[in-house]
Image (spheres, grey):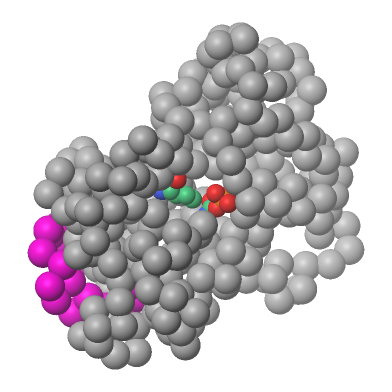
Amino acid sequence: MTAASPIPAPGFRSVTDLDPAAIRAVIARAAELKAGRVTGPEARPLAGRSVVLLFEKPSLRTRISFEVGIHRLGGQAITLTGAEVGLGKREAAADVARVIERYADAIVARVFRHGLLDELAARVAIPVVNALSDTEHPCQALADLMVIGEHLGALPGRRLVYVGDGNNVAASLLLACASVGMHIRVVSPAGYAPDPAIVARARALAAQSGSEVEIETDPAGAARGADAVYTDAWASMGQEDEAEARRVIFAPYRVTEAMLATSPGALFLHCLPAHRGEEAEDAVLDGPRSVIFDQAEDRLWVQMALLERLIAGPRAG
Ligand code: CP
Ligand code: NVA
């Protein structure tokens, strides 16, 4: 809580708000929390602190994992949804944030327009965390890296193939993989490729980390050489009107057992919610390579580590 608004706090609106070392540190801390190695007062860094969660869109995993995580860290979560939020409608986003700053220590927000996150952050010194925007889903990408590491060990040199819409989840995966030295291939129908600005940022990171970024459109052989194959909804929240048209356009991009035959041993990931019968066959979602519920669980641990870092400060060492 602060009464003034000096210097904007580091937030987490994009994956790249954490540098590669910080991404690794958050995932390592999340693993310590998950293993139960953090006990006593150290386990309650948010004691006496409050975090406000704002949701313009529905959520299962994000809301529950943040609320449970904040509780476990000793803090209090206050959640506002839908019309209650009224970001930029009932009240200017910057004013909403300046009010929250007088009561609470961080804002976690799920929004349609990514720019709203920047508007929330513009006039406050408390961190603003992206709980999914139309542009990125950075907390999801942190959890995904953690899961891949748990199953495959060291991340550098591994290859993730994302098949489907090149929007928010794909964007954060591009930035996250390129940050930590993982190769990434995004395979999307023409017209649904990732934003070129995100691809350029990912390529710049990949040049530093020694990884490759491939953007393709042909679903045939998409999964070749993959250590992990990832997909997401064909129509994201807010695109419900396009769902019917997208079902036709994206049908060749469904992740099937046949598609995965070119990458024996690869993990299968999906951020969920899954639209069964659409982006992935049930046999894949429920198959032996699927780690989709590990992804849901690791949202909890990475977000605890992230909030600890953003509110209580980075840990030494
Ligand atoms: N993956 C994810 O963010 O799920 P929710 O939309 O249920 O929060
Ligand atoms: N791309 C999806 C992700 C849901 C977690 C959406 O934006 O709806």
Q: Quadrant of residue 76?
A: top right
Percent position (x, y) of residue 186? 22, 60
Pick the residue in front: 247 or 149.
247
Left or right of 178 in this view: 292: right
Residue beneath the point at 49% across and 19% down: 119
Percent position (x, y) of residue 111? 51, 31
Magenta span: predominant SS is: loop
Residue 293 part of the magenta segment = no
Q: Kindly tell me whether residue 208 is visible in this rendering.
A: no
Residue beneath the point at 29% across and 90% down: 264
Left or right of 186 in this view: 294: right
Relative vertical location of residue 261 with respect to residue 34 in this rendering, above or below: below
Q: Quadrant of residue 115?
A: top left
Percent position (x, y) of residue 250? 24, 56
Residue beneath the point at 19% across and 61% down: 187
For the image, the number of numbered tags is: 0
Image quadrant where one finds the C terminus: bottom right
Residue beneath the point at 66% across and 46% down: 63
Percent position (x, y) of residue 251? 24, 61
Image quadrant where one finds the N terminus: top right
Q: Kindly tell me whether residue 138 is visible in this rendering.
A: yes
Left or right of 120 in this view: 5: right
Magenta region? 208-229
Relative vertical location of residue 159 with respect to residue 312 in this rendering, above or below: below
Residue 224 part of the magenta segment = yes
Left or right of 280 in this view: 81: right
Pick the residue in front: 209 or 142.
142
